[in-house]
Amino acid sequence: MTNDKCQMTNKSFKFKAFKSFGFWILFGFWILTFGFSADAAIDLAEIGVGARCLSQGRYYASGLDDASAIFTNPAGLALNSNLKVVSMNGSLLSDVNYLLIGAADDSPMGNFGIGFISASVGGIPLTTVEGTGASRTIVQTGNTDYSSSVLLFSYGTKFSRIFRGKGDNLLFGLNLKYFLQGFTGGGTVMQDATGGGMDADLGFIWEVNPAAKLGLSFNNFLPVDLGGKFVWYRNNVVEAIPMTTRLGGSFQVLEKIKLGLDYETNSQANIPAIWHTGLEYCPIPVLAVRLGVDQKAKAETSGVGVDNNLTGGLGLTIRGFTFDYAYHQFGDIGENATHFFSIGFRGGDEPGEIFSYQGPKRKSSAQVTVVPKPVIKSFSDVLPDYWARQPIEYLAALNIMSGYGDGSFRPDKVITRGEMAAILVKAKGFDVREFPPVNFTDMYPNVGVAPYVSAAVQRSYMQGYSDGTFRPNAPVTRAEAAEIFANFAGLYQKQKVDQKVFPDVSTSHWASPALAASKEAGLFEYLTGNNFNPNEQLTRAEAAEILSKVPFVKDQIKQMISGEG
C-alpha cells in the first residue's frame, strides 16, 4: 500500500493516490483487516457483528441470541423466538463510514432474518507521477469514492421443529450473502471498477446444558463452482471468497459471569489460525460489562503475524431494548482504535410484556354483581374462520393471554415454558408478590416471567429439572401440556392406564395418566379422531384452546360473555 502504484483488480487497472501518510496507513490497515490483497472481495460481516459481540472479543460460534446472529452464526436466531433488531454505526480507522442494520423474527417454519452492512471512503485522491529522476513530482488527477456492501438473508431453527420434537437442544442456520463493492468517480481510469458476488454461511449450535453451548460455523463455505465467488464486472475476473471456520463455546462459570472462546481457521494457506475470547459480567440484570481479546492476522515484513486486539464495552437492556457500546483496538496504532454503538431490540420474556414486572394491581374489595362486558380483542393474524379464534379472543379479553405490539397473536408460534407459567398464574388471578422466589440456575429471580414461574412451581402446576434449571425458553410439547393442564385443573390421575388414550400413545408412556384425565375432561376435544403426537410442540393457539376448556377458565369466559361478575 505504500508503493507508488496500487493494483486494485487483478492487474486490470492501476491508480495512485495520496491524502496523507497517516491516511495510507489507516486505509492500508483497513484492506489488510479484510483481505491481504486489495483486489480481494471484502466480506464486511468480518466486523459486522454488533457492538455486543465486538466488545467481548468477537467470539460467536456458540451463538448470539439477538439479531447479531444474522451476521455471525445464523443458528443463533433460534435461541430467541422474539422479534430481534440490531443496528450499529461507527467510523472505522477515522475515515471509513460503517453502518449495519438487521432484523429477524419467528414464524411457523423457523426464524427468518435480513441484514445489511455498508462501508465507504470518500474523496480518495487519484495521482500520477510525472518527470524522471530528481525532477519526479506527484500530481493529483482526480478523486474517487470506495464503497462496499453486503446483503444477508438468514434462517435459523431447532432440529425439533423439523424432527417432531427430537433434537430440541440442537440448532442450525443458513445465510445467503450478496456482495457489491467498487469505486465510483475518477474518470476513465476508474471506470466500471465495481464487482459483485455471493456466498453462504452455515452454522450449528449444541445446547449441552443451560450453562454451556458449543457451536460450529462455516462462513463463505460455497465453492466457486456452486456460486461462491466475486466477479469484477469490467473484465469478468472471478475470485474465490476465503472461507473461515469457527469452533467455540460459551460457559456460564458463575451466576453472573459468562466466558466464551472461538478458534478460527482460514482457507487461505498464508493466514494463521487465530483465537477470540471474551467475558461478560452482569452485576444486575439490566447491565453487562464486557472484556475480550480479538486476534487478527496482519501483514509483516517476515510474513503474516497476529495482532492481539483488546476489546471492551458496556450493555444496557431496558424493556426489551438494548444499548451497547464497544471499544475495539486495531493493531498497535492508537488512532486505529474504534468506538462502536449498537441499538437494538431482543424482546421480553413474554409476548406483549417487554416491561419489567411491576406486579398486578390489587383488586378492590368492593363486590360487583354486574359489570360491563369487556371488549373482545381481535388480532390481525387471527381470521374470522380460524379454528381457535374464539378462545384466543376470549382469553385476550380476560388479559390471560396477550398479543404482540404489531397487533398480531402469532397463533402458530410454539409456546415456551415461561409463557405457559404466566398464563396459568394469570388465569388463577394470583398476586405473584405473595409467592417467595424459587431459585433456578438459569433464571434471575426479579426479571421477566420469574415471578410467574415461582408461583406456578409452588402451586405444583409445573416443576423444574433435576439439574436445578427451569428452562423458561424451552418449548412445551403436547405430552408436557397434558401433565401441566391436568395439574392446573386439579384432575384425578390414575397411576396406570389400561387402554390407549390415543392410537400413537402407549399405555406405558409417562404422560398417559395425565393425558387420560385431560382427555376425559374434554381438554383435547380439538384432536378427536387424530393422533396425539406427544413430542409435537404446543402452539399458542392450542394452549388457548385447551385452557378455555378448563372448568375454572370456562366459568370466567361465561361470566365475561354474560356480563355477570
Image (tube, rainbow, N blue to C red):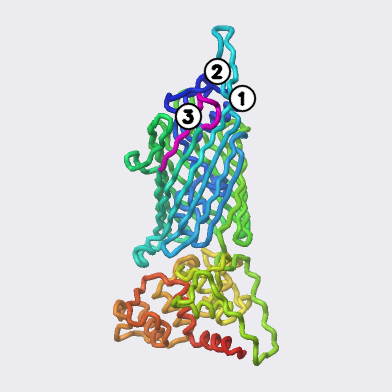
Q: Amino acid at mark 2?
A: Thr
Boundaries of the magenta span: 183-198
Q: Amino acid at mark 3?
A: Ala
Q: Amino acid at mark 1?
A: Lys
Q: Secondary structure at mark 1?
A: loop
Picture coordinates of residue 439, whole percent (x, y): 55, 69
Distance Cα–Cα, label 3 vs label 2: 19 Å
| Residue to which mark 2 is pinned | 128
Distance Cα–Cα, label 2 vs label 1: 13 Å
| Name of the residue lying farthest toward the front | 188
The disc, 1 or 3, on the residue closer to the chain's N-terminal end is 1
Instruction: Give whichever of 378, 95 is nearer the camera.
Output: 378
Is residue 457 shown in magenta? no
The relative height of residue 183 versus residue 393 in the rendered view (above or below) is: above
Instruction: Give whichever of 481, 109 is nearer the camera.
Output: 109
Picture coordinates of residue 431, whole percent (x, y): 62, 78
| Residue to which mark 1 is pinned | 19
What residue sits 46% from the left and 45% below the top? 262
Picture coordinates of residue 299, whole percent (x, y): 48, 28
Instruction: Please state if 61 lies on the left or on the right of 329 as rendered.
Output: left
User: Local crowd at mark 2 within 10 Å, few (<14), some, or many (≥20)?
Assistant: some
Point out the image quarter for the C terminus. Answer: bottom right
The relative height of residue 74 versus residue 392 in the rendered view (above or below) is: above
Q: Are the residues flagged by discs 1 and 3 in contact, CB closer than 8 Å?
A: no
User: Local crowd at mark 3 within 10 Å, few (<14), some, or many (≥20)?
Assistant: some
Q: What mark, if any, has residue 38 been given in the picture?
A: 3
